[in-house]
Image (cartoon, rainbow, N blue to C red):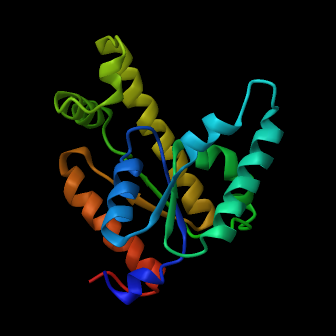
Amino acid sequence: MTDDVCTLHTFMICGAQRSGKSLLAESMAKENALQLFNMDKIRHSLFNETLSVVDRKKLADRKIREIMSLHPRRAVIEGVTAYNLCRDSLEKHSFPAPVFFIGFTGDIADKRRGIDTYRAGGKCWTLRKDMSDQMLDNLAKNQVALSLKQRDFCLQYGYEFIEIRPAHFYFDMHDAARKIVASLRGSEVI
């Protein structure tokens, strides 16, 4: 681990389900000795059905700001929830950390093949559910649609969107980590 890595500011990785954000965040945390915060797990521990959407957003914003004050450097926040709950702050550019989006905006059939490949490895959460081919097709379609929506959001508000292609998943994940570290250091990716 280099001194440059030790001084990285805390940052957030957003993306659709199955975009690879958790794997990327876990890998970066392990490789760079970063604290890892999963917003989806935090959300499940904090929220209950009685909270309104507005209250959920306020609570998530407060929790992220608490994480940022306790860990201004050397931490990564990730989760599907992050984008949905923090969108207002992201739109106003008042979010307290650099944010990176990852996703796949290509062919739905490619995304479905990526889901099938991941399932074959035995790690995918879809294995724990009885999911028909139609359900998996819909999952791939929804993931691509959300990635497109998030890419458009990034274009509109000036955030970085990093494409992760299913056929080049591990290469693109490694490249995404390099891009994020370079961006946080304020340098170009070599």
From the viewer's perspective, tell me whether residue 126 is left or right of residue 117: right
Q: Residue 188 lies in what quarter of the image?
A: bottom left
Judge whether 190 appears above or below 154 on screen: below
Q: Is residue 13 above or below residue 127?
A: below
Report whether 11 appears left or right of 60: left
**Residue 56 screen position, x and y as percent:** 76, 40
Work out whether residue 91 or residue 62 is closer to the camera in this orientation and state it.
62
Q: Is residue 40 above or below residue 102?
A: above
Q: Residue at x 38, y 46 (%)?
A: 105
Q: Position of residue 155 (x, y in %)?
A: 55, 61
Q: Is residue 40 left or right of residue 27?
A: right
Residue ID at (26%, 83%): 190
Count of picture labels: 0
Q: Is residue 70 above or below residue 15?
A: below
- Give the position of the N terminus as an image quadrant: bottom left
In-front residue for pair 95/40: 40
Residue 162 percent coordinates (x, y): 40, 60
The residue located at (82%, 40%) in the rendering is: 54
Report x, y in % for residue 164. 32, 53
Residue placed most toward the observer, 56 or 68? 68
Apparent side of residue 92 relative to residue 77 in the rendered image (left or right): right
- Of 129 and 41, nearer the camera is 41
| Residue at left offset 63%, top offset 63% | 157
